[in-house]
Amino acid sequence: MGFYESILRPLAFRLDPETVHHLAFGLLERGLIRSQAFTDLRLEQTVLGIRFPNPFGLAAGFDKDARAINHWHKLGFGFFEVGTITQHAQPGNPKPRLFRLPADRALINRFGFNNEGAEAAAKRLAGSNSPLPFGVNLGKSKVTPLEKANDDYLASLALLKDFGSYVAINVSSPNTPGLRGLQDKAPLLDLLHAVRGALGSKPLLVKIAPDLEPSALTDIVDVVIQTGVDGVIATNTTLSRAGLKSPESLSQEQGGLSGAPVREKANDVIRQLRTELPTEKVIIGVGGVFNGDDVYEKIALGCHLVQVYTGWIYGGPSMVPTALRQLVARMNREGIYSLGELRGSALS
């Protein structure tokens, strides 16, 4: 056990999770949290025309307002996403809205897209100088009726499309009423056609839920192909509570569950997507990633890139470089010399 796992994490886990989140941001912005980055030429790759120093990124949800964009490279990440950002500033759901489930290595959140809005994010991004590629993750404002969702996304896009390396459309958070209905084929086709037209040639991805039926996933594959979307982020949090060890006082909190219990659900989605999507379509895998073996597994299932959220909160500042070292060690043991060789190898 390292210093974080044995000393800092037990102390931090005695505090309110969202308080710890804000404290970590303050330390990061002051340059007081950092780790030794791990580099290996075999981890570098070009995806979507973008050069990534390694395949391991920070998922949306942590840097909601693009406050730490100049600092994520210090923790070893190969890329990151800001957001989710909505057209209108919104406070999100009432607190408490973030819950730890240590017995399950999981979190439940019902944040509700709390953020300062697209205009504030655009002003902050205009002053950024990130050395890493990053995505801009967009969601629907709570005050916007579902039938006006396209207008909401497009208004945010107009302000933010010139920032970042790619845009991600989030239609899968369980914490905005009705949002997951946008994953249905007809509304998703309409939305992504509109976004693709407004965005131009910049890479575009859609973030989906882990709770979809196989037939619904096939519909999403069809939409991605028809609209020229470049890839899929799989997956967001789950509403399932199956198999949890935590007491019901925790496990039955409303919200999306992330962490180890999502791993297999996310992997099942990734497996189907990789089987049905054209090979040029990119998959970013997220869900239940805690170490290098988890990164290896998702790439072997067909992912080009992998993201982490809950695993990083549990693992601490050294988690990313440690996982990358483990990934390279596993590749060495298996006689695999590139990410391209690893990608999809579990499906053959």
Image (cartoon, rainbow, N blue to C red):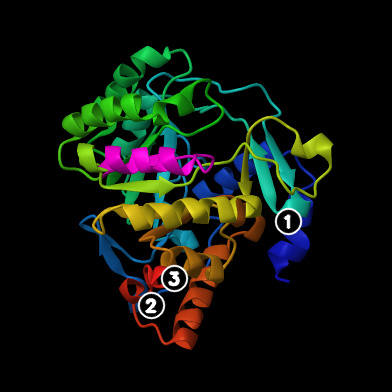
Describe the element under mark 2 as helix, strand or loop.
loop
Considering depth in this image, is 38 or 292 the residue closer to the camera? Answer: 292
Mark 3 residue type: Ala
The nearer-to-camera label among 3 and 1 is 3
Answer few, some or many: residues within 10 Å of disc 3's Cα (few below 14, many 20 plus, some between 14 and 19).
Answer: few
Label 2, on which residue? 40
**Range of residues picked out in magenta:** 204-224
- Sequence-wise, which precedes: disc 2 or disc 3? 2
Answer few, some or many: residues within 10 Å of disc 2's Cα (few below 14, many 20 plus, some between 14 and 19).
Answer: few
Q: Is residue 222 magenta?
A: yes
Mark 2 residue type: Asp
Considering depth in this image, is 257 or 121 the residue closer to the camera? Answer: 257
**Quarter containing the N terminus:** bottom right
The tag on residue 346 is 3
Which residue is drawn at the image coordinates 50% and 54% (left, top)?
A: 268
Describe the element under mark 1 as helix, strand or loop.
helix
